Amino acid sequence: MRHAISLLAATVLLSACQTAAPPVARTPPGTPAAIQLAANIDIYKSLVAQQIMAANGAYTYSGRLPPMLPAIVVLDLSVGADGELQSVRVRRSRDSEASAAALAAVRRVQSKFPPAAHLMHRHARTFDFSETFLFNEQYRFQLRTLSGPQ
């Protein structure tokens, strides 16, 4: 009996020492499997960036960024609580061709973005964030959210 109690106590102590899993996108009960709720803003931006990249395969590149980027465009996106794109505008750019390409890339996404209601401020009507498009010489892009350290 003592051995069983000691074993149980050791198991409880060991399970209490485990670290929490990192936050990930989750699907709440009762929602379609394709809809994911991001645990935080960084994960949300990553999900959106993945959708943009998936919708623009012919316009993207992967691998190391060139030493000198010919164009960098920062877009401001506003998404409704249900994931519907409400607006997109250029925040920063020095290249009108790259700006047009970045705007077109966001508009090519045919489906809604992930729901954003749980990330919105209390009385906000939209969830607002920015994404940076990094262009190479052929005007193909990577998204800063997904490019990682170079």
Image (tube, rainbow, N blue to C red):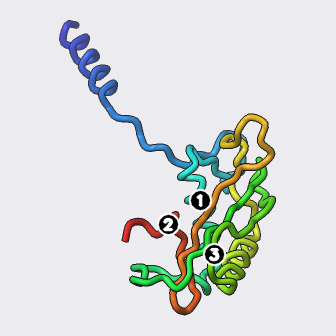
Q: Residue at x 74, y 55 (%)?
A: 79
Circle 3 or circle 1, nearest the eye? 3
**Residue 104 occupies quadrant:** bottom right
Q: Are marks 2 and 3 in contact (CB under 8 Å)?
A: no
Tag shown at residue 88 = none
Q: Are marks 3 and 1 in contact (CB under 8 Å)?
A: no
Tag shown at residue 146 = 2
- Percent coordinates x, y for residue 132 in the rendering: 57, 68
Secondary element under disc 3, as helix, strand or loop, is loop
- Percent coordinates x, y for residue 13 in the rendering: 28, 21
> Which residue ends up furthest to the bottom in the rendered image?
138
Q: Which residue is mark 3?
A: 93
Q: Which residue is mark 1?
A: 47
Secondary element under disc 1, as helix, strand or loop, is helix
- Percent coordinates x, y for residue 93 in the rendering: 63, 75
CA distance for labels 1 and 2: 10 Å
Quadrant housing the C terminus: bottom left
Looking at the image, residue 91 sits to the left or right of residue 21; the answer is right
Q: Identify which residue, 94 or 40, lies in the foreground.
A: 94
